[in-house]
Each structure stands twice: as structure tokens, then as C-alpha cells.
Image (tube, grey):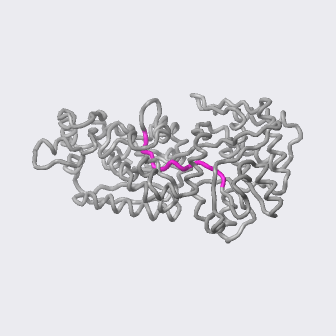
Amino acid sequence: MKKKVLSAMLVAAMTASVLAGCGNQGGGDASDNSNNSTPNTQTPAQTGDDTQTGGDDANAGAADPIANLIAATEGPVSLDLWCSETAAYQEVMAKIVDNFKAAYPDVEFNITIGAQSEAEAKDRVLEDVTAAADVYVFADDQLVELVNAGALQPVQATYTYNPSEVNAAGAVDASTVNGQLYAYPLTASNGYFLYYDSNIFTEEDVQTWDGIIAKANEAGVQCGIEATSGWYLYSWFAGAGCSLTLNEDGTNTCDWNSDAGVAVAEALAKMYADPAFINLTDVDYSAQLTEGDTKVRAYVDGTWRSGDIEKVFGDGYAATKLPTFTVNGEQVQQRSYAGYKLVGVNAYSENVGWSMLLAEFISNEESQLAIFEATGEGPANTNAAASDAVAASPAISALLAQAPYADLQRVGGKYWDPAATLGKNLAEGTITDFKAAMDEAVAGINAPTE
């Protein structure tokens, strides 16, 4: 993808906008960078909320970056957009794109929507940043690597609203590196909590894993979590006060081989030894739900599974924060990772101005509500999150209840394989020397990057 520099007309209009002093001022350099190996450094002049007004005043048009962008546009605007491959996301994004086109009828758009999992967006983008989509949705834990690779256009200026002011503080933090916003918050529900069938489990049962396992045995059902995913494995150790942090060089600092970490491993092995508590991947659970029935009636998962679980659990469909579990005879609150989906603009986009405006539109209040209605994923926008429809969602309510016990996922790549191996061994009951097993896992997690 070649880097396209905005025309001199747009540059002049941006300068006029800044000098006019309309709203908050900002924006990047508007110099001509024609080297195709360097990213686009141009951004629209930042304005206040009333950016689409202009009237008949000649100076008003100069102060309106959207009018400037339209005036500087010649011919069709082609943009590639990547978002989740799920049918619900593809359908709702198509509607949002149609709304975007309708908002700017004087411009001809060719917008292609590609199917790309947010979980793997970083890997796809970094294969060749210059050939990646102009706008793409990705999980927040990929932000630092994308920034370090120069794959994201900084949000130094805005067209229609300030993302830092309308979204939840946690979502803004997840979109920021060293004080600079690099992406637009989209959803605030990429975390996990407990789903349960209230026809089997009471609210008291689901406060502790001991209570859940006891009731599951009594009722002849099962409960579980994906043991082989480091995303979920973190929750047990973090709950007991163990730490896992990302260093500036991309390595990890993990202390799970401490006395507390060994005690957690022993507690987990004991839980998995009970036939009512099982290791079950999200993919396998999804398949069970699709078949219309499952013995697993209490399960740790995220908002993306809400519709499937509700269909199977029926009037028993319920959700709550993660339970406590027993470590050394004491109840410990299980923690979690808090996750966000973000919209990024490719720094090498040929149409960086339109890409930024599209990213704003995709992540505005109305669009976030449309995504919630289509997928069940909670909005990052504070007004959208406060709506009656969102508040009525058991899954979103559970996520909010878990929020005080949730952490941003910031972890180096060396974490995942040792964590998966550790989780598998704990679930299968193959560990005989827990201290040695934890030492081995931590050595792998803390290993230097290649």
C-alpha cells in the first residue's frame, strides 16, 4: 500500500482551521513525505464537538476539517476494513459502513470489509503493514507491538468527537501508550466471568467454586473453564497475589513459583481431580451449545458466548462475577483480564484522513450500540453503556461486577506456551512435584526474547 500525501489544498485548509481557533487545536505535521517506506504523519485539525457546521460564512468552511477533507477529495475513496469474521460482526459492520456512506453523499466510496479475527489482527498486520487494511479492529493487548512497529496512526486530532472524553477511562487507558492515544475504543467487554444455570445453582452456590462443584455433583452436571489458555490461567494466580508483568524489552517478570503460586497450583490440581470440574475449551463448549444441550451448566466465558448460552439455559440463563476459590484453607477472589476491542488506522493508509473519519464513525455512540445489539458485546462509550438495553444484559452486568477484580492484559509472547502446558498438566493431574513444575513454567515465561 503506497502512502498517499494529502493535497496542498487540504494542508492549507488544516492550517487555516488551526489559526481560526475553532475548538481544541492540534494535529500532526502536514509536510510532504513521499518515501513509501515511511508512515503517513498527517492528521485532521482537531476541533470541538460542532465540527460539521459551517453555514454561509466563508471562514466557517476553513474551520471545518470534514468540509476540507471533502473539498480535497478527487475521485472515489477506496478503503479496506478488517473486523471479526463472525456473521454477526460482518452484518452489523456492513450496516455501519452504509450509514457512513450515507453521511457523506457527496463522496464516492469503495469500502471493502474483510474477515479478520481481532485476536490475530496484529500478526496479519505485521506480515506487511503497507499491505494491511486502512482500518482494522484488534484486541487491546496487541497495542504496544503495533505501536512499536509503526503500524498505527496516532489519534492526535479528531473530526467529530474526542474519544478520550466519551469512552470509559479503562478503555482509553487500553488505547494509550506513553500518554498518546493510538486507537479508538470500540467495546469494553473482552473479559470473562461466570455463566450459570439458575435452575440448578443458587446465587449462594455461585459465590465460591466449592459451592459450585458441590452442587454440580449433587445435580449430576458439570462446571468448568478452559485450563489450557493462559488468558484464563492468569486469573487463579493473580487472585492469590502472584504477579505477571511485561518489561520494556518484551520479556516477562513472573513470580508464580513462589509459595503462593505453588499453593494455587496445588489447589487447581485438587479441583480438576473432581469429575464435576472439567477443562473445556471455548471452541468445544460452543460446539456443545450448538448441538442444543450440554452437561456443563456453569462455565467461565465472555460476552461473545451469551446468545448461545441463553438459548440452551433458557429461563435459567444467569451470569455473575468470578467465584472465590480455596487456597491454604482461605477463600481467594478469582481475578481476570479486562479486555477491549479497539479500532486502529494504518499509518500507511493511502487515505489517512478518510480512514480516521471512518474509524471515528465505527466507534461512535450509535455504532457501539448497534454492535451491542448485534453481538452482545458491551460498549466502551459511557452513554451507550448506560443505556437501558445494556444495563438489562446479564452478561454485561456480570462483567461490570468483575471489573474491580480485572487487570489489563500486558504480557510478552513467551508467556503463552508455558502457561498452556502448565494448565494442561494441572488439568490432567500429571504433576507430582509442584515446586519443580512451577519453576519450569516460570523459567519459560521469563525466558528472553529471541
Question: Which segment is the magenta one?
Answer: 182-194
Is residue 317 at all visible to an observer of this figure? Answer: yes
Expressed as whole percent of the image width and height from the top left, the position of residue 338 reads 57, 43
Q: Nearer the viewer, residue 366 or 279?
A: 366
Q: Nearer the viewer, residue 41 or 278?
A: 278
Expressed as whole percent of the image width and height from the top left, the position of residue 399 reads 58, 49
Classify the position of the C terminus by image quarter: top right
Q: Quadrant of residue 395?
A: bottom right
Expressed as whole percent of the image width and height from the top left, the position of residue 217 reads 83, 59
Q: Up-down: is 201 above or below 57? A: below
Instruction: Identify which residue is drawn at 84% across, 37% down.
Output: 434
Relative to 439, 133 lies left or right = left
How many numbered dots are placed on residues in this image? Answer: 0
Expressed as whole percent of the image width and height from the top left, the position of residue 300 reads 67, 53
Q: Up-down: is 418 above or below 276? A: above
Instruction: Judge whether residue 193 is colored magenta.
Output: yes
Is residue 31 at all visible to an observer of this figure? Answer: no
